């Protein structure tokens, strides 16, 4: 399947207005646009090089849609892409999927996107991801929608939180440092071709297939102090981060777009009445 034909169905269903994005589904053999990017993967295995190159191509397409001149996208802090000045962005990849999202820094503080295969987490990983009330929420959600891998969705949501946090300048964030809750309302299970939720019997986890579709929102609450962009500047990064999630075509995606606060309008003192 061509990622370009499928774009409107995945990242495009989740991201805010003003964010540009691109994605590829399936396996592709696109080369990196710049030799400097190829050099970053000189010692990597062929599969990893293809994954890296396709993700970089998605990033360049998204940047071009934003009007940013083409240039090598190298590594920044902790291996994440060093986005061009005045932009924020995020890249994700998993088996069969590569995606990137970018936005102007004048409108957004940070972006975080994550894609995962729609399957339960491996044994032992769930306990390292879910904390406090999250485990009870996972059980309740699984009872309601057993066809959705909620534990993997929680993992993905926290990955998106971390990417947004790291892009803003946060040094470290553990799974225990953010608490995720879920909104399961009218967006949870859209019917193809029309909006709104659909009440229908849900298959068991064993019956989960690529036909499972769901769309919703989540809220991540930071349990640590937000990062400071510099020692002299206050943090604009909020403690509560709204996000969106999607399950479709055997994949699940989560996104967080942190808007830049709009300063209040400047008020001047009322003019003295002229006599």
Image: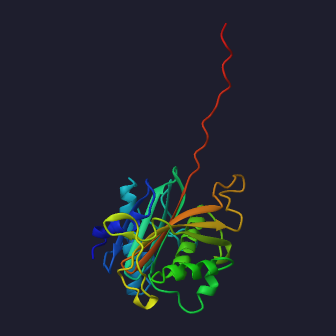
The quarter in which the N terminus is drawn is bottom left
Kindly identify the residue that appears in the image at 55 percent across and 74 percent down.
159
Q: Nearer the viewer, residue 8 or 84?
A: 8
Residue 273 percent across, percent down from the top left: 67, 13
Q: Is 272 drawn above or below residue 252 in the view shown?
A: above
Task: Identify the image's colour scheme: rainbow, by chain, secondary structure or one colour.
Answer: rainbow
Q: Nearer the viewer, residue 17 or 140?
A: 140
- 20 lies left or right of 157: left
Task: Locate residue 139: give its quadrant.
Answer: bottom right
Q: Nearer the viewer, residue 267 or 118?
A: 118
- 51 lies left or right of 110: left
Does any portion of residue 154 appear in the rendered image? yes
Task: Locate residue 200: give its quadrant.
Answer: bottom left
- 47 lies left or right of 2: right
Kindly identify the residue that appears in the image at 48 percent across and 68 percent down.
216
- 230 lies left or right of 148: right
Kindly identify the residue that appears in the image at 52 percent across and 76 percent down.
156
Residue 72 percent across, percent down from the top left: 42, 65
Residue 140 percent across, percent down from the top left: 58, 79
The quarter in which the C terminus is drawn is top right
Q: Is 202 drawn above or below residue 221 in the view shown?
A: below
Kindly identify the residue that appears in the image at 67 percent across and 79 percent down.
131
Residue 236 percent across, percent down from the top left: 64, 54
Does any portion of residue 112 appear in the rendered image? no
């Amino acid at each position: 399947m061509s990622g370009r034909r499928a774009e409107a169905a995945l990242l495009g269903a989740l991201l805010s207005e003003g964010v540009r994005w691109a994605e590829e589904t399936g396996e592709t053999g696109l080369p990196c646009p710049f030799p400097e990017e190829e050099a970053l993967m000189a010692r990597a295995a062929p599969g990893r090089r293809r994954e890296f190159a396709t993700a970089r191509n998605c990033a360049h397409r998204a940047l071009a849609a934003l009007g940013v001149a083409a240039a090598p996208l190298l590594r920044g802090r902790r291996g994440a892409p060093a986005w061009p000045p005045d932009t924020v962005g995020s890249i994700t990849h998993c088996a069969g999927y590569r995606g990137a999202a970018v936005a102007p820094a004048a409108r957004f503080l940070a972006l975080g996107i994550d894609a995962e295969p729609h399957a339960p987490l491996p044994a032992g990983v769930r306990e390292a991801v879910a904390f406090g009330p999250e485990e009870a929420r996972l059980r309740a959600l699984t009872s309601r929608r057993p066809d959705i891998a909620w534990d993997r969705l929680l993992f993905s949501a926290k990955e998106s939180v971390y990417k947004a946090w790291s892009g803003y300048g946060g040094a470290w964030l553990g799974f225990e440092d953010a608490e995720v809750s879920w909104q399961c309302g009218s967006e949870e299970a859209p019917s193809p071709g029309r909006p709104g939720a659909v009440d229908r019997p849900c298959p068991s986890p064993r019956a989960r297939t690529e036909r499972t579709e769901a769309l919703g929102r989540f809220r991540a609450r930071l349990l640590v102090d937000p990062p400071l962009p510099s020692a002299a500047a206050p943090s604009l990064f909020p403690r509560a981060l709204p996000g969106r999630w999607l399950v479709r075509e055997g994949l699940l995606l989560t996104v967080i777009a942190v808007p830049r606060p709009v300063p209040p309008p400047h008020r001047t003192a009322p003019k003295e009445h002229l006599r």
